[in-house]
Image (cartoon, rainbow, N blue to C red):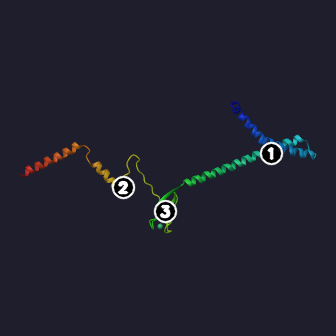
Amino acid sequence: MNLKEKLKPALDVLTILIFSAVPTCIVSSIFAGGITLLGFGNFWGWFYLVTAIQAILGWLVNVVSSKVLGVRMLEAQAQALLANAYQNAELNCSYCNVRNTTRLAIGKENSFKCAACNSVNAVHIQFTTARSTEPLTSDKVLKDIFDKIADEPIDTTTKQNAINTSKIEVDKSTKQES
Ligand SMILES: [Zn+2]
């Protein structure tokens, strides 16, 4: 098992050689043999020449196909980016108030045709910012609640003191009146 793993790279190289070098040699032999049989030059001269031509052609095909593959990958990436640039949104039609699902793109003019009344709606995208550490109080009701909580005294003794002071003041005023 260990020996098989050690031999694997060598076997891979051998497989590549068999599947690329052997057909190349066969083609070279046929060409060289044919030309020599016709009486032009010697076999090995033609054999090396045809092998070199095949190697150059193979290299060219490799370069071109990898370039084509690169272009196709870029195209696929561009399409994926384009797909991500759109955001689905549920919006009410400004004419009939029916909810429509539409695709929106930031930085583009967006519009949709209502599925119910066929009217074309323009979509305006607005952004709001908020401090990430504070609660969102844009809602007026919520803001009032937060303000009330903030105004209420937390210390109960202070509140009691305030009541006592007002009582004393009332007592004083009633005394002055009498
Ligand atoms: Zn509509």
- Badge number at residue 28: none
Q: Between marks 1 and 3, how big is the CA–CA gap?
A: 61 Å
Question: Residue at 76% across / 37% down in the picture?
Answer: 14
For label 2, the residue is: 139
Viewed as shown, does residue 96 lie left or right of 26? left
Q: Name the amino acid, label 2.
A: Asp
Q: Between marks 1 and 2, how big is the CA–CA gap?
A: 76 Å
Question: Label 3 near label 2: C-beta < 8 Å?
Answer: no
- Badge number at residue 100: 3
Question: Residue at 19% across / 46% down in the picture?
Answer: 162
Viewed as shown, does residue 148 lie left or right of 23? left
Q: Residues within 10 Å of mark 1 (few under 14, many from 20)?
A: some
Image coordinates of residue 31 in percent, x first then y, are 86, 46
The residue at the far front in this view is 1
Question: Label 2 near label 1: C-beta < 8 Å?
Answer: no
For label 1, the residue is: 54
Q: Between marks 2 and 3, how big is the CA–CA gap?
A: 25 Å
N-term mark: 1 or 3: 1
Q: Residues within 10 Å of mark 3 (few under 14, many from 20)?
A: some
4 vs 55, nearest the viewer: 4
Question: Residue at 49% across / 64% down in the picture?
Answer: 122
Q: Does label 3 point to a residue whose CB lies under 8 Å from ligand 1?
A: yes
Point out the frontmost of discs 2 and 3: 3
Q: Name the amino acid, label 1.
A: Gln
Secondary element at tag 2: loop
The residue at the far right in this view is 39
Question: Label 3 near label 1: C-beta < 8 Å?
Answer: no
14 vs 46, nearest the viewer: 14
Image coordinates of residue 170 in percent, x first then y, are 13, 50
N-term mark: 2 or 3: 3
N-term mark: 1 or 2: 1
